Amino acid sequence: MTKRKNLIAGAALVGAATLALAGCAGSSEPAASGDATASGADRPIEIAVFNGWDEGIAASYLWQAVLEEQGYDVNLTYADVAPVYQGVSQGDFDVVLDTWLPVTHADYMDQYGDSLEDLGAWSDEAKLTIAVNEDAPIDSLSDLAANADAFNNEIIGIEPGSGLMRITADDVVPGYGLEGMNLVESSTPAMLTELRAATDADENIVVTLWRPHWAYDAFPIKDLEDPDGLLGGAESIHSVASTTFATDFPDVHQWISNFTMDSATLYSLENAMFNEYDGDDYLPVVQQWISENQDWVDSLTS
């Protein structure tokens, strides 16, 4: 399942993803180095994708296109955070490209880390945020409680299993006295729909968000200051793999371990996929973007 419109039903996908875990595993042989026609093992590469996290969706589609060009078969499976880490730890998924450290996904790495391999960070410019419309009457989280009525007493959130929602609920809400506001458990696509509607209508809105995200280029929004640092500092986005990934797909393991992507390049890809394109089949969009950024993409497997 790779259609963005289906991400709205994130909770329902947990069951579907769990079922998918049972069918993903299998024995394999090492990849044949340098031979695209024989480069895969006797099964596809299984990439897990977090529901709603666009930077991970973009990176996953990018690598699907790159690896298929190299002769591999690649499956993308959407799921919520918990079943992804369980699946990678069990070898049912080979890799997930959207682990935020040291804070957002720390609990999952603590739980499953002994059965995972951290392939390193591909972005060092990540940060959790609480964002509002650009002309909102406040600039800081410390002023939100006193102005809750201006935002309909709601903070529009994303998927309930995400690290962002956990940190918002456990740290930000009590830390800034926001218990009187309703933290709405939603999905990333639903949150973005609310954000678009509010900014189009010149209405106030407060949402959970993160950088890098294409929404900062698409909508007139600003981050609320976090004077107490409860959302954490800058984070890195890591690729995390099963412990058998290096043996099963040694070339791919090396390529993804060396992968880096700056925010400007990521924004360009995200804008092409999620802002400029109004459809569900992302692979042709990504392939077109690759053709316009061919030298950089070729460096990923050089």
Image (spheres, rainbow, N blue to C red):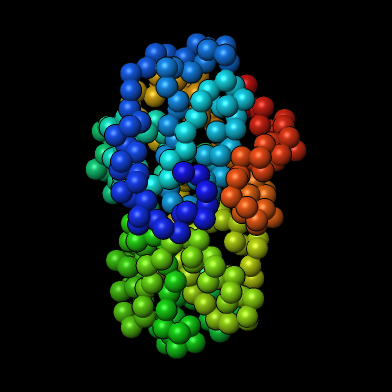
Say which of 200 and 6 sits in front: 6
Residue 27 appears left or right of 43: left
Vertical arrangement, residue 254 with respect to residue 102, above or below: above
User: Where is the C terminus found, in terms of image quarters?
Assistant: top right
Q: Residue furthest right?
A: 292
The answer to whether residue 224 shows anywhere in this view is: no
Q: Is residue 195 left or right of residue 286?
A: left
Figure check: 188 above or below 108 = below
Foreground: 123 or 270? 270
Q: Quadrant of residue 115?
A: top left
* Residue 248 at x, y percent in the picture: 40, 19
Residue 93 horizontal/vertical position (percent) = 37, 33
Residue 192 in view of the camera: yes
Residue 50 position, x and y percent, is 43, 48
Q: Quadrant of residue 260?
A: top right
Which residue is depicted at the point 39% across and 13% down? 29
- Name the residue at 45% across, 84% down: 152
Give percent across and percent down for residue 300.
61, 28
Looking at this view, is 94 or 15 the one in front?
15
Answer with left or right where residue 85 lies relative to residue 54: left
Q: Residue at x 56, y 27 (%)?
A: 67
The residue positioned 42% from the left and 13% from the top of the image is 30
